Image (cartoon, rainbow, N blue to C red):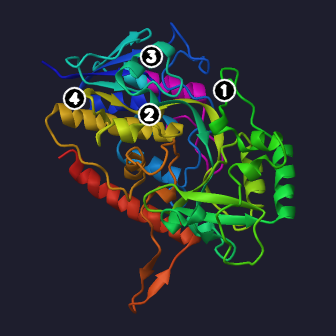
Amino acid sequence: MMEIVHIIGAGLAGTEAAWQLTKRGIKVKLFEMKPQKFSPAHKNPNFAELVCSNSFRADDAAHNAVGLMHEEMRLFDSLIMQCADSSRVPAGGALAVDRNGFAELVTQKLLQTEMIEVEKGEVTQLPSPDSPLTIIATGPLTSDKLINAILQKIDNDSLSFYDAIAPVVYKESIDFSKAWYQSRYDKGDKYDYINCPLNEEQYYHFIDELTAAEKMPFHDFEKPNYFDGCLPIEVMAERGRDTLLFGPMKPVGLTNPHSTEKPYAIVQLRQDNKEDTLRNIVGFQTKLKHGEQERIFRMIPGLENAQFARLGGIHKNTFINSPHLLNTFLQLKSQTNIMFAGQISGCEGYVESANVGMMAGYFAACLLKGKQPLIPPETTATGAMLKHLQDTTGEYQPMNINFGLLPDIKGEITSNGKFRKIKGAERKEAYSLRALQDFKQWMSRADA
């Protein structure tokens, strides 16, 4: 009897997982609630619907992490990348697509194979332990009934309904002639926090710019459902010009080694990944437009030249606490015939969602064939994304792929045996060269 995998959700993760499974001779039953029921963000009855034509973002593999992920997926014969390349429209260095054409092409390619059976309608229950292996790839707007079923299976604290994301900066872009390491009252490891001081004039100028800045509007299906522990930084500032002095910018318990002047306010940055290449701006979740975030947060002393791995945001996005709930192969630890893929697993972005779906399909095929799946090395964009889904550092939050998730490359040994530091574009090229070499090596063994 031919093996079968059930996939719930025909978005980018679900369709990519289905493609990878059928390529490996595994039959798929694909459950999709459209067109019987649409989420508030979707209108097209086809699979893999995109909201934005530029959803794939930059396509430069040598200098951009998402472009690197594109290339790794092309090497792995990704359905999503095939259809994106075929549906491409002019957009300079970005991979923009004809959204309707893209969705139609994905749908056609999957329906052309006899290995896929499609069942239309909403799934409201999780599979039993004796059901076929099932990949849940329902995305950030998973229906309420299925969410309730998931909640019955997992700890309520392991499911989030809103991203409340603070900006993340590359640590190497912080100016340590102004910033310093120290925890409040010297508790814990002194390297836990990086501190950026503001004097009184700088603080009130920052507050004025913050409250006057342009904000991103909520979608119709997003209600500003704030709670006091997760208020946007600009909302706190609007409650009073001194509010932040008693919140995330309080200056107590810290001593500036660069000046005898006592800081009027402090901005702290907390470690955001195990390698400590990324730092999260503590308490700075925000609905500011991205350009405004870069402009205003670079007003903070020490962050004038900050490079952002991720900008802040608050939006509806249902996702599970993957490091707590899933094993290395994206299986639910408490019931291993259930897997999660795509944005519900806590990756951020269409490309990343498809990438995790690609790996879920590969893992599922290996498991059904009795083979041990090989995890791609963390030096690759794909491996780094999977590693993020296992990262227990701090509070788990969705993340786009960025070079800060890959192991650091500080420099190289020259022909005369000396160390040469590399940075900027050359450093990004080094990340990408290493990643593609390692990905190809991994591929040569992955399906052996």
- Residue type of the residue flagged with mark 4: Gly
Q: Earlier in the sequence, mark 1 or mark 3?
A: 3
Please report contact status of discs 4 and 2: CB closer than 8 Å, yes or no. Answer: no
**Which residue is label 2 attached to?**
342
322 shown above or below 263: above
**Which residue is label 4 attached to?**
25
Q: Earlier in the sequence, mark 4 or mark 3?
A: 4
The answer to whether residue 53 is seen in the rendering is: no
x and y, in percent, of residue 20 in the image:
32, 34
Q: Earlier in the sequence, mark 4 or mark 2?
A: 4
Q: Earlier in the sequence, mark 1 or mark 4?
A: 4
- Residue type of the residue flagged with mark 1: Asn
Cα–Cα gap, marks 2 and 1: 24 Å
Q: Secondary structure at mark 2?
A: helix
**Which residue is label 3 attached to?**
148
Q: Is residue 189 left or right of residue 382?
A: right
- Residue type of the residue flagged with mark 3: Asn
Q: The N terminus is located in which quarter?
A: top left
The answer to whether residue 278 is seen in the rendering is: yes
Q: Is disc 1 surrounded by few (<14), some (14 to 19) or many (20+) residues within 10 Å?
A: few
Q: Is residue 16 magenta?
A: no
x and y, in percent, of residue 296 in the image:
78, 54
